[in-house]
Image (tube, grey):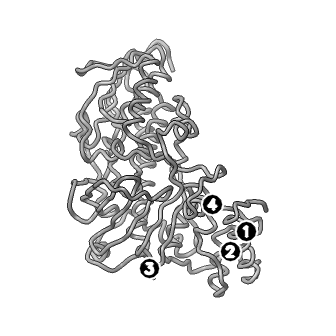
Amino acid sequence: MNARSSLRSVAVIGGGPVALVSAVALKQALPDTEVTLIPAPVPDDALADRFPLALPAVHDVLARIGMPPELLLARGVARARYASAFADWSRDGTEWMVGDDAAATLAQGRLPALWLRARAARERVPPFHALVPACVAAAAGIADPRVEPALHLDPARMGQALTSIGRQAGVRFAGTPIDADLTIDASGPARLLTGDRAFEDWRDAVPCDHVAFSPTETDPGTCDRYVATAQGWRATWPGVRVEAEGTGIAIASGRLSEPFAGRVVALGDAAVQAGPLGRIGFTLALGQLALLLELLPERDPEPLLQAEYNRRAGLQADRMRDFLGLHYHGGGRTQGPFWHRLREASRPPSLDQLLAQFARRGQVVPADEELVQRDAWTAMLLGQGMRPERPDPIALSVAPAEAARLLNDLAARLAALDYSA
């Protein structure tokens, strides 16, 4: 960056973890720049701030500001989430799980391909999630040090920790807006500075337009639990019962077409409202923050840099939209008014292409700006009941009985916490 035009001042507007982590990260990246946090109310629909969860793909962003996962877990700022379980969400009603870490591996070929090979021949094999260490740990209610979990963050404790780190780093806390070289709008869906920008509607792809939250004493442990209903779905998170069935807080899922324009960048729910499913919002906010730190602007806005940021942030958000959309459009549950309406909903071309590729070949093609484990896509599609038309050529070299033996042996070793080959 050209020192003659480096940023002299940055203002961050917001009142939750997204604003705080942005201010701290920018101050640490720009120690000679004045960074000011201007508090703003946290709206009810600011899900990234109210229910922050960080997937493993963005743990390095937290580690960079002095909040590595092991420290957050040790100090009670975070608790581990290993997986999510889905009931009444498949074609035959069988429960399935998606892990937050990668699946195990087999030297004889790709794991999903071998699983499909054995299943097609009616060999007896475990469910796919029994081959994912994170799912095994979650189902057993144990903490496995070899699994990198997602971090369910306590927003109050996170806020206290970030405020302390910010003050030590030199972040200023002010009560009124200031004129800055760069301003971060982290005010949530209120979009106090970016409300007039073009907004891309995701309601067809991610059809959750209302959600209600209520406290509960039920503790799901390290596994979020979802149950599909005729009118939508319900979930249990740590300390919270969730109902996405047409009442409660209005949710307008979608994203800004250009989160970075002029001297203002929208981050978090101000840029992308992904809805409650999966608690994805904070992960997206950290992914956007990482992009901003990588493409750190100068004092005078650079159109090419802004265009690159918007392109990559858009790819990141749209890929997450497709991941969430697969929960609804992946061929799982079909019964009930909510699910019937999905038949008439239009889907993004990228989601249609992903579904078509998996239906033909059983593969999920990697994408740029990915924040979700590739195995999570496969686990979700297989769990809902989708089966590809063509077998994997590599798996054809393994006899179905041998594939079943390998899979059952792997599942037994995972259940015994033995990952040796």
Residue flagged by tag 1: what amino acid is it?
Gly
**Mark pair 3, 2: CA separation:** 23 Å
Q: Is residue 364 left or right of residue 289?
A: right
Which residue position holds label 1? Answer: 109
| Residue 124 occupies quadrant | bottom right
Which residue position holds label 2? Answer: 114
**Mark pair 1, 4: CA separation:** 18 Å
The disc, 4 or 3, on the residue closer to the chain's N-terminal end is 3
The disc, 1 or 4, on the residue closer to the chain's N-terminal end is 1
Mark sitting on residue 93: 3
Residue flagged by tag 2: what amino acid is it?
Leu
Residue drawn at (42%, 75%), measured in percent from left and top?
Answer: 332
**Mark pair 1, 3: CA separation:** 29 Å
The disc, 1 or 2, on the residue closer to the chain's N-terminal end is 1
Contact? badges 4 and 2 (CB < 8 Å) = no
Residue drawn at (58%, 63%), measured in percent from left and top?
Answer: 140
Residue flagged by tag 4: what amino acid is it?
Pro
Which residue position holds label 4? Answer: 133
| Crowding near the residue tagged with mark 3, few <14, some 14–19, many ≥20 C-alpha atoms within 10 Å | some
The disc, 3 or 2, on the residue closer to the chain's N-terminal end is 3
**Mark pair 1, 2: CA separation:** 7 Å
**Mark pair 4, 2: CA separation:** 17 Å
Contact? badges 1 and 3 (CB < 8 Å) = no
The disc, 1 or 3, on the residue closer to the chain's N-terminal end is 3
- Quadrant into which the C terminus falls: bottom right
Contact? badges 1 and 2 (CB < 8 Å) = yes
Mark sitting on residue 2: none
Residue 108: x percent and y percent? 77, 69
Which of these two is toward me, 181 or 83? 83
Labels 3, 2: front one: 3
**Mark pair 4, 3: CA separation:** 23 Å
Which of these two is toward me, 353 or 59? 59
